Image (cartoon, rainbow, N blue to C red):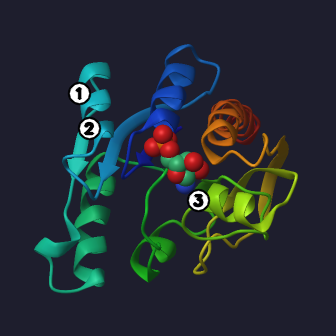
Amino acid sequence: VKIAVFASGSGSNFAALAEACKAERIPAEIVLMVTDKPDAFVSERANEIGIPIAAIRPRDFETKKAYEQAVLEALQEAQVEWLILAGYMRLIGPVLLEAYPERIINIHPSLLPSFPGKDAIGQAVAAGVKVTGVTVHLVDEGMDTGPILAQRAVDVIDGDAERTALAIHAVEHELYTTTLQNLFKK
Ligand code: GRF
């Protein structure tokens, strides 16, 4: 299976997935790393690993539609079959949703439907919940909505967002790997 990973930030999930694909724990090949933020650390990681980068800036386009069409061209060029979102901080629009129906997956650092959107870990700590977690789900037109594929609970550590985030990220890397493993082996 040929996949593209979409990321806007540090790319720790991207790195974990790249390692799992290389070790054949996930039966897939990352043929492209798509980023909307060319300067994000994830680009350095992709360079280091040797995965091609499509760095496409939305602000270079007049509309979201035109931006997504440029992304779609890069995906089609690389014959990408599934889109794997890993800290891609944008809502997927109709162009990509229609090109990849039920073929777009996202990971989110909460037990959805609780705490969708930005800073889910901060939201959970502020709400005072004792347990939060990680969700892997199919992407639809909503923000962090769409059918849930897998979830795992993570304790909130002493109301401390930073320490909780470390625990969450470790679980993310593992849960994303096992979920994609199961999905692609069929
Ligand atoms: C992760 O927590 C992911 O769930 C969220 O953004 C974060 C990205 O982290 N959507 P990284 O860039 O993979 O390190």
Residue 177 appears in which quarter of the rendering? top right
Q: Is residue 125 left or right of residue 6?
A: right
Position in image of residue 151 (x %, y %): 82, 49
Q: Of the residues tagged 3 and 2, which is closer to the observer?
A: 2
**According to the image, label 1 marks what residue?**
47
Q: Residues within 10 Å of mark 3 (few under 14, many from 20)?
A: some
Of residues 42 and 149, the one nearer the viewer is 42
Q: Disc 3 versus disc 1: distance between alpha carbons?
A: 26 Å
Q: Is residue 140 above or below residue 88?
A: below
> Which amino acid lies under the numbered mark 1 shown in the image of this protein?
Asn
Residue at 42% from the left image edge and 38% from the top image edge: 11
Q: Mark 2 touching mark 1, by CB under 8 A?
A: yes
Q: Of the residues tagged 3 and 1, which is closer to the observer?
A: 1
Q: Residues within 10 Å of mark 1 (few under 14, many from 20)?
A: few
Earlier in the chain: of badge 3 and badge 1, it is 1
Label 3 CB, ligand 1: below 8 Å?
no
Earlier in the chain: of badge 3 and badge 2, it is 2
**According to the image, label 3 marks what residue?**
103
Position in image of residue 12 (x %, y %): 48, 33
Residue at 78% from the left image edge and 40% from the top image edge: 157
